[in-house]
Amino acid sequence: MSLIPDISPLTLNRLSVYLRCLRILEAEGETKVSSGALADRFELSPAQIRKDLAHFGEFGVRGVGYDVESLGAHLHELLGLNAQHNLVVVGIGNLGSALCSFLGFNDSSFRVVAGVDADPERVGKQVGDITVQPLEALETVVESAGIEMGVLTIPPEAATQCYERLVASGIRSILNFAAVQLPHRSDVRVKNVDFRVFLEELAFFRRDPS
Amino acid sequence: MSLIPDISPLTLNRLSVYLRCLRILEAEGETKVSSGALADRFELSPAQIRKDLAHFGEFGVRGVGYDVESLGAHLHELLGLNAQHNLVVVGIGNLGSALCSFLGFNDSSFRVVAGVDADPERVGKQVGDITVQPLEALETVVESAGIEMGVLTIPPEAATQCYERLVASGIRSILNFAAVQLPHRSDVRVKNVDFRVFLEELAFFRRDPS
């Protein structure tokens, strides 16, 4: 494993986007792409692409561009996607059910291997590849299924307690969809997702179409 | 309406986050907050806060900080949240259903006023405040309900066609959850959301816990 320089979540999100774009080009049979062509095709910034990738080594060849397959493989490894990360989804309502069946959460890098819910009516239900288990079983499930990431798709009032239980079970990576500020712990990484932020971005640009 | 300087989606997303933080402080009865205190409490960068807000005028008073209520009100207006934006959700599966009932999509700034689905079994179903209508009615629904934003929560293979229909109906703001690259149009703003990117960020930090 090579040394990884400091990298911000924003840079990281761009690397994810580049990887996605490279996979599309690869599927289309492209073998080389310049930063300019990549930027044009996917509405990205060529200077930003060059800057982001230059952080991690010399990938491009001047006048030729990047090798689509090898750059994709490198980003894949850099993002930690060579390993399979097992997920538990906590809360199998509509959003939890959608995520359990989501293809991007069920491939060679990520896999929803368990789902738990407090509602007895949901327990035993088949969602995607999993059978919903009772919330009480959370700790057992985490241990027995080799889970390393938790996804919180429960109401805000239950989120903090479930967070604590996940952390106590050894989980250090949490994707949180509940509208609540989880307690900070320096050894746990929480990624909060608030759909509202996306709408606010769209609302802003309605004021000032450009 | 004051002149709005150039602003990137990333800055905009941070303004949304600041607004959210200010609302929490306001609910707690705080009237003043310094950039340092705001940063500490919500794990933000004080320098970034000062820089972002300085773009839009002189809000802070040195040694006193920001007025929680008036800064909140200003950001609210700046983000275009004083108007109510009506939404149509296209595709009322699990994710679409979750969004129809999501509080952040149903307040004085945003409101899901319609939902459509191609599946006859879903038509007529009550979800949140709306009754699911058939996909064929999309254009009629957009016009009659004064809709200005579309949310695509349909399978990728149907997304492009629904996008074109929304645009033809006059919609210029689209929140897209479908894993597909929609055709670029300079007069339409599309915000793509891919849950996978959030997991990739968590996966990266598992390699290099800090």
Image: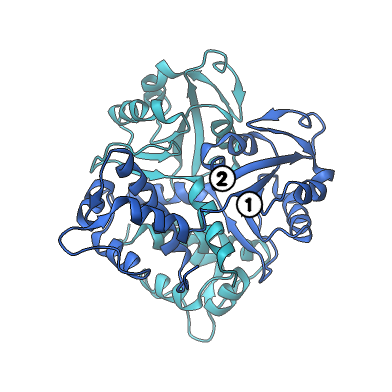
Chain colours: A cyan, B blue
Callout 1–callout 2 Cβ contact below 8 Å:
yes
Compare residues B185 and A202 and report the one nearer the observer: A202
Q: CA distance from mark 1 to mark 2?
A: 9 Å
Q: Which residue is mark 2?
A: A104
Residue B71 or residue B10, whichever sits in front = B71
Location of the C terminus of chain A by quadrant is bottom right
Secondary structure of residue under mark 1: loop
Is there any visible trace of residue A81 in the rendered image?
A: no
Find the residue positioned furthest to the right.
B136
Given the image, on which type of amino acid does mark 2 rest? Answer: Gly
Q: In the figure, residue B65 lies in which quadrant?
A: bottom left
Callout 1 crowding tier (Cα within 10 Å): few <14, some 14–19, many ≥20: some
Q: Residue at x 48, y 63 (%)?
A: B9
Callout 1: residue from which chain?
A: B
Residue at 56 percent of width and 42 percent of height:
B105
> Looking at the rendering, which quadrant does residue A167 occupy?
top left
Task: Please identify the residue farthest to the bottom as the structure is shown.
Answer: A63
Taking the spot 41% from the left edge, 70% from the top edge, the residue there is: A52
Residue B80 picture location, percent across and down: 52, 58
**Label annotation for residue B179:** 1
